[in-house]
Amino acid sequence: MKRNILIAGVAGIVLLGGAVGAGAFDDRAENTAPAAKKTENAISMEKAEEIAVKEAGGTVEKVEYDKDDSREIYEVELRSDNGNDDTDVKIHAVTGEVISIDRDDDDDDDDDNKSNVQNTEVKLSKDEVIAIAVKETPGKVVEFEFDRDDLVYELEVKTDKSEVDYEIDANTGKILEKDTDDDQD
């Protein structure tokens, strides 16, 4: 009788130990799974621009990195060479695959005003403006836009601790506005 109780007790301890061990294994798997899901962008913002221009043509007006439906994407806004059409191209940020191309005709705009704006030249290139912003706030540029009406570049630089929005004069390189949003996570 004592032997049966001893065997049952040892079996219970073995089963309990196995269950605890299995539970610990499962917890470890859960804790590593989210990290495994985090991916680094396989393509750069510049590569996304190159893909968009190759697919749809035109000049890059805006680039934005976003996570959409658990996919990492770049949204690239292009202006046609004649200035009459806007095209939005969504590109998978990991594979470089074109997800969608959406063309929008701007027939409702004033053509005289558009030709004047398009002929306005700026002194600083996109790369020069990005260098100014990243020098001020080291990080990754996740959004970029050229505002033709105000002749300013609008950028968002993301760091480990914050997101910094910049508005930079397209001719002088002067930082007109800097707004920092600290991550509270």
Image: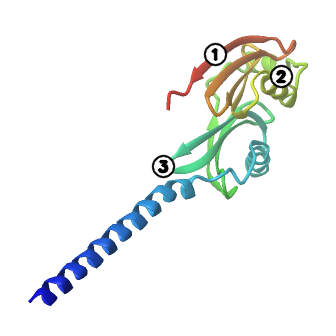
The answer to whether 79 appears left or right of 4 in the picture is right
In the picture of the structure, the residue carrying the numbered disc 3 is: 69
Tell me the CA gap for discs 3 and 2.
33 Å
Please give the residue where the numbered disc 1 appears in the rendered image.
Answer: 179
Callout 2, which amino acid?
Answer: Ile
Of residues 19 and 118, the one drawn nearer to the viewer in this rendering:
19
Q: CA distance from mark 3 to mark 1?
A: 28 Å
| Mark 3 or mark 1, earlier in chain | 3
For the point 82% across and 24% down, the residue is: 135
Q: Amino acid at mark 3?
A: Asp
Q: Residue drawn 15% across and 89% down?
A: 3
Image: 172 above or below 45: above
Q: Secondary structure at mark 3?
A: loop
Q: Is residue 48 above or below residue 25?
A: above
Q: Would you call the spot at circle 2 few (<14 residues within 10 Å), some (14-19), or many (20 or more)?
A: some
**Which one is earlier in the sequence, the residue at label 3 or at label 2?**
3
Residue in the picture at 35% in, 66% down: 23
Q: Amino acid at mark 1?
A: Asp
Q: Residues within 10 Å of mark 3 (few under 14, many from 20)?
A: few
User: In this figure, which residue is indicated by the disc labeled 2?
Assistant: 132
20 or 56: nearer the viewer? 20
Q: Residue furthest left?
A: 1
- Nearest to viewer (mark 3 / mark 2): 2
Q: Please, what secondary structure does the residue beneath circle 2 have? A: helix
Q: Position of residue 66 (x, y in %)?
A: 59, 41
